[in-house]
Image (cartoon, helix red, strand yellow):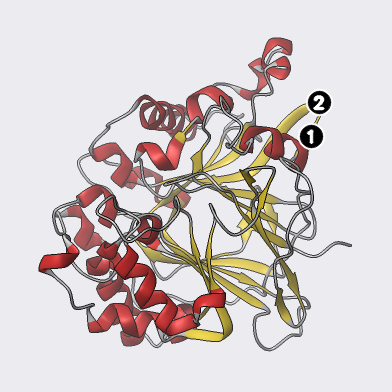
Amino acid sequence: MANATIKYYPVGNGDTSLITLEDKTTIVVDCNIRNCDNDETYDVKKDLLQSLQYSNGIPYVDVFILTHGDQDHCRGFKKHFYQGAPEKYSESDKKEGLIRVDTMWFSPMIAEEHTNDDEDAYQKEAERRLSLHRSKDPKKDNAGNRIKIIGYDGSTDYKDLDHLRAKPGDIVDRFNDRNQVLFSIFIHAPFKEHLEALGDDKKNSTSIVFQARFKKTSYQQDFSTLAMFGGDSDHTSWCIILEKTKKYKNEHALKWDLFLSPHHCSWSFFNDRPQEENPDPKDTSLEVLNYRRNNAKVIASSKKILNDEDNPPHYEAKREYVKKVTDGNFLNTTTYNIVNKIPQPIVFEVTSQGIVKPKHVEGSAKVAGGAGLGIVNTTSKYGNGEV
């Protein structure tokens, strides 16, 4: 059985990641699928179709997690992912290679403010699925109709669907109606505090933040790999994460081997922008980075990082990360591995000794999707549902 893999796609200033477990369960985190209208853009859609599993000829992802609704995190959802009743998936949809999403992770924060058609499409599909649960439709739990609510409600009320909800402090170890013994996700954010604007950019600060946890065996005491995902979360969110995680003695949930730099290596993780007016990183942000484990790596899903005013990515943010992990462990998706002018995905394999250093990929637009991994069922919360 192949090992689990974590794949970070080169999508410029945007996020698209694919987690593949040992049993071939797949989890897509965000998407920024661009048109391959030049010779320097990696074909993410083609790679997904090669990496995902198929059911009766239909490509499907077990779980799709949208951290928040910015265009560079959901671009291509409307075009490349199937929306609607799964039983109505047609031969025409199959020819177009539309990917069925068996389970959606939906944050009510997304419902607060829409800014693009892909975000609208995600919301509409989520509401379709939620309505099946409200009406107790017998098809509500079928693949293609499943949904999990992440976090708390804003102006739109989903309190009648609490049985579908996972909150900060919860550990999820069931994905697409299957329990995982060796893999789980610890949810960090968004918080109740996010129902009121934090900072200048509420949408970014309300991103779903989670720690993905991998083990090789059920009797293993510690995790083989810990990977942190946080969308465009800013320093205000990480300050709360740090405070609450320590308060409820869940500091194990702050450790990481892989850290996807929030907002494409933006200074907003360290302090307010512009960086010139707020030159000192917050102590809380630096403390979060101190939870790194040996040989930890920071991944910057961004365009090439230059010392200029076109940001994000911020050159000063990169410098702060490098101080923590060294230059060799700071990897930029645009520059790490280029084949025939095309940036290739950065792929990590999870082993019993931890992550295997990514190897340069030979060839373009082809990276095999690995198999997967998981964790024991250890339920914990921040405490009494307080967030």
Q: Nearer the viewer, residue 62 or 319?
A: 319
Q: Which SS class for mark 2?
A: loop
Residue nearer the viewer, 353 or 222: 353
Residue 97 place in picture, x, y as percent = 69, 23
In this rendering, does residue 83 appear at all?
A: no
- Mark 1 element type: strand
State the residue at coordinates (58%, 37%): 40
Quarter of the C terminus within the rendering: bottom left
Q: How far apart are the alpha carbons under marks 1 and 2?
A: 5 Å
In this figure, which residue is indicated by the disc labeled 2?
Answer: 57
Picture residue at 20% right of the left edge, 41% below the top: 155
Answer yes or no: is residue 340 visible: yes
Quadrant housing residue 20: bottom right
Marks 1 & 2, CB-CB < 8 Å contact: yes
| Depth check, front residue: 387 or 212 | 212
The residue beneath circle 1 is 54
User: Which residue is drawn at the image coordinates 38% and 61% (left, top)?
Assistant: 265
**Image quarter of residue 46:** top right
Residue type for callout 1: Tyr
Front residue (pair 266, 141) = 266
